Image: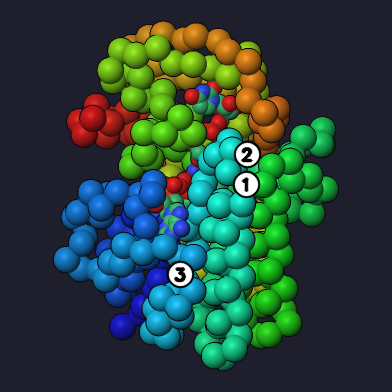
């Protein structure tokens, strides 16, 4: 039976990924300390997976888990908030970089060779240089501890692959939205906070003028891309994952209001430190590999609202 380890598998993207892997008949192991993830995210599959509520920074523990010799390792565990990394740079560094390097090192030392080690990096590595769209070989400018750690970890991922004969890929997600994104922290993904505010008639604080742009992508397309890439021979390479569309935050909010048939109460506030002004993916490399997204922004927003209003 095909086996997969998903770190951060109780989180937003991780739980959506775990569902698809279970559907494919994989035997899935999840390690998540539930700092942001929720057991409830995995309720429907909990009896079909091996779940460890544990910190990926506990190296001894991770070594025992890695001894299973998985076919696929999807490394998603991270403190996913850029703003949180600015508040807690060292704590987030331990998760976002040290734990990744330790895992790679253990694979090297024990000569474990998964079919793919996939690390989830971020568009945040590109920073604020003006050239758009961002290609995988565009200049990087990591402006926050989060971005520095993501960039370093993806380099370790690629270089461990090249130096020690591991099949690795790093993916740079652009802005992902959809079911099971936890809105409970002020640092949560923006569309999960917008959703919570719409559901509860709360005021939403928009940091900046709303003209900052992001390449929003629906989580189902992200999960399909992760599975697709991991099953190709792609190796020791970085891939952007986005739609290749640049959307102003305020426009996406208006589009979402239409899907929800509700109006959001918005209060404007100063921009956040380290916030990126403009973001847009060049997805040529992923397209050439043969991947086509199926959902798109509009369908994704509609389906997200439908899910949120039924599960609210
Ligand atoms: P998330 O916060 O929902 O998922 C991360 C998971 O990691 C959570 O379940 C959390 O509990 C877990 N975790 C955190 N610290 C841990 C630790 N020390 N030990 C074990 N588990 C720990 O966020 P997400 O949006 O699902 O992000 C998944 C991955 O994708 C992250 O690596 C994130 O940096 C990356 N990413 C996300 C986006 C996005 O737009 N959501 C964009 C780019 C990259
Ligand atoms: C997001 C991801 C990060 C990822 C990056 C890749 C989360 C929490 N962050 O960062 O993991 O690496 O995309 O591009 O998933 N905003 C508001 N009000 C709010 C919250 C946010 O106006 O209540 C604004 C922010 O200031 C920012 C935009 O919305 O301008 C997006 O913020 P956020 O969802 O936190 O995403 P990024 O910082 O882009």
Q: Quadrant of the N terminus?
A: bottom left
The Cα atoms of the two marked residues, 1 and 3, are separated by 19 Å
Left/right placement of residue 198 relative to residue 223 reads left
Position of residue 304 relative to residue 226, above or below, is above
Residue named by callout 3: 58
> Where does residue 252 sit, x and y in percent of width and height?
51, 22
Relative to 31, does residue 294 appear above or below in the rendering?
above
Q: Which of the 4 quarters of the picture holds residue 23?
A: bottom left
Give the CA separation, mark 1 to mark 2: 6 Å
Residue at 58%, 13% in the rendered image: 269
Q: Is residue 14 visible?
A: yes
- Tag 3 or tag 1, which sits nearer the N-term? 3
Labels 2 and 3: the sequence-earlier one: 3
Ligand 2, by image quadrant, is: top right
Q: Nearer the viewer, residue 121 or 132?
A: 121
Residue 74: tell me if it is visible.
no
Q: Badge 2: few (under 14), some or many (20 or more) residues near its Cα, within 10 Å?
A: some
Label 1 SS: helix
Q: Secondary structure at mark 2?
A: helix
Q: Which residue is mark 2?
A: 86
Which residue is label 1 attached to?
89
């Amino acid at each position: 039976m095909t086996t997969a380890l998903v770190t951060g598998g109780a989180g937003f993207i991780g739980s959506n990924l775990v569902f698809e892997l279970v559907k494919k008949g994989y035997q899935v192991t999840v390690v998540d300390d539930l700092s942001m993830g929720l057991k409830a995210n995995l309720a429907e599959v909990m009896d079909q997976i091996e779940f460890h509520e544990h910190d990926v920074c506990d190296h001894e523990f991770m070594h025992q888990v890695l001894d299973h010799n998985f076919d696929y390792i999807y490394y998603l565990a991270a403190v996913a908030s850029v703003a949180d990394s600015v508040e807690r740079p060292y704590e987030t560094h331990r998760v976002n970089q040290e734990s990744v390097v330790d895992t790679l090192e253990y694979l090297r030392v024990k000569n474990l060779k998964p079919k793919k080690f996939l690390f989830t990096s971020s568009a945040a590595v590109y920073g604020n240089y003006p050239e758009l769209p961002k290609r995988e070989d565009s200049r990087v400018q990591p402006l926050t501890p989060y971005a520095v750690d993501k960039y370093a970890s993806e380099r370790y991922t690629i270089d461990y692959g090249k130096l020690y004969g591991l099949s690795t890929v790093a993916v740079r997600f652009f802005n992902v939205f959809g079911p099971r994104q936890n809105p409970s922290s002020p640092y949560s993904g923006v569309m999960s906070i917008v959703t919570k505010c719409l559901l509860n008639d709360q005021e939403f604080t928009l940091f900046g003028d709303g003209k900052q742009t992001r390449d929003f992508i629906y989580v189902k397309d992200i999960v399909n891309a992760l599975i697709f890439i991991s099953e190709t021979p792609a190796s020791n390479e970085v891939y952007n994952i986005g739609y290749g569309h640049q959307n102003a935050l305020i426009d996406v909010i208006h589009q979402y209001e239409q899907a929800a048939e509700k109006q959001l109460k918005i209060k404007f506030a100063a921009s956040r430190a380290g916030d990126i002004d403009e973001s847009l993916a060049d997805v040529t490399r992923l397209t050439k590999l043969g991947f086509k997204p199926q959902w798109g922004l509009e369908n994704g927003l509609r389906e997200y609202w439908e899910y949120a209003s039924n599960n609210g």
